[in-house]
Amino acid sequence: MNSKQLAGLIGPTLVVLTVSESLNAHIWTGNTASGVYLNGALLFVAGLSVIRSHNLWVRQWPTLITLTGWMATSLGLFRMFAPEMQLKAVANTSLVTAEAMVVLVLGIFLTIKGYSPDTGRK
């Protein structure tokens, strides 16, 4: 799978996840450690699948896909091994909002790269 295909998958997913989670922020206040753990397991598997299919380190935008895979894997591990800490972190709304904005911008950028006309580079 090339970088454009992955960007076309990951970008819109990040946008939808970020917007939907922001609109439904109230659901996270009642989350449980087991819910955080399950979320972490899913993030870990998703991140690992990106790393396995796209472990590309170049000085171009496709490196963002690899970094996204590593970030998802790392966040998944954190949520699996320290779900209670993740629940406490959600209480810091300004930090959560800043993180959401970074993820949204990354998602928009990858969506543009994934769906822009092919220029011959991957």
Image (cartoon, helix red, strand yellow):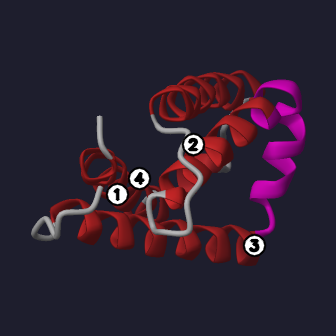
**Does the residue at mark 2 contact the one at mark 3 (Cβ under 8 Å)?**
no
Instruction: Report the side of 95 relative to 18 (left or right).
Output: right
Q: Which residue is at the front of the view, 118 or 98?
A: 118
Q: Which residue position is annotated with label 4?
A: 17
Q: Secondary structure at mark 1?
A: helix
Residue 96 is drawn in which quadrant? bottom right
Q: Earlier in the sequence, mark 1 or mark 2?
A: 1
**Does the residue at mark 4 contact the one at mark 3 (Cβ under 8 Å)?**
no
Label 1, label 4: how far apart the Cα atoms are? 10 Å
Q: Is residue 115 above or below residue 52?
A: below
Instruction: Report the side of 21 relative to 97 (left or right).
Output: left
Instruction: Report the residue at 55% width, 39% height from top.
Output: 55
Q: Which residue position is annotated with label 2?
A: 69
Question: Residue 108 location, x and y as percent?
Answer: 34, 71
Question: Residue 62 location, x and y as percent?
Answer: 44, 58
Which labelled disc corresponds to residue 11?
1
Q: Which residue position is annotated with label 3?
A: 95
Q: Magenta segment range? A: 78-92
Q: Secondary structure at mark 3?
A: helix
Type of the residue with mark 2: Gly
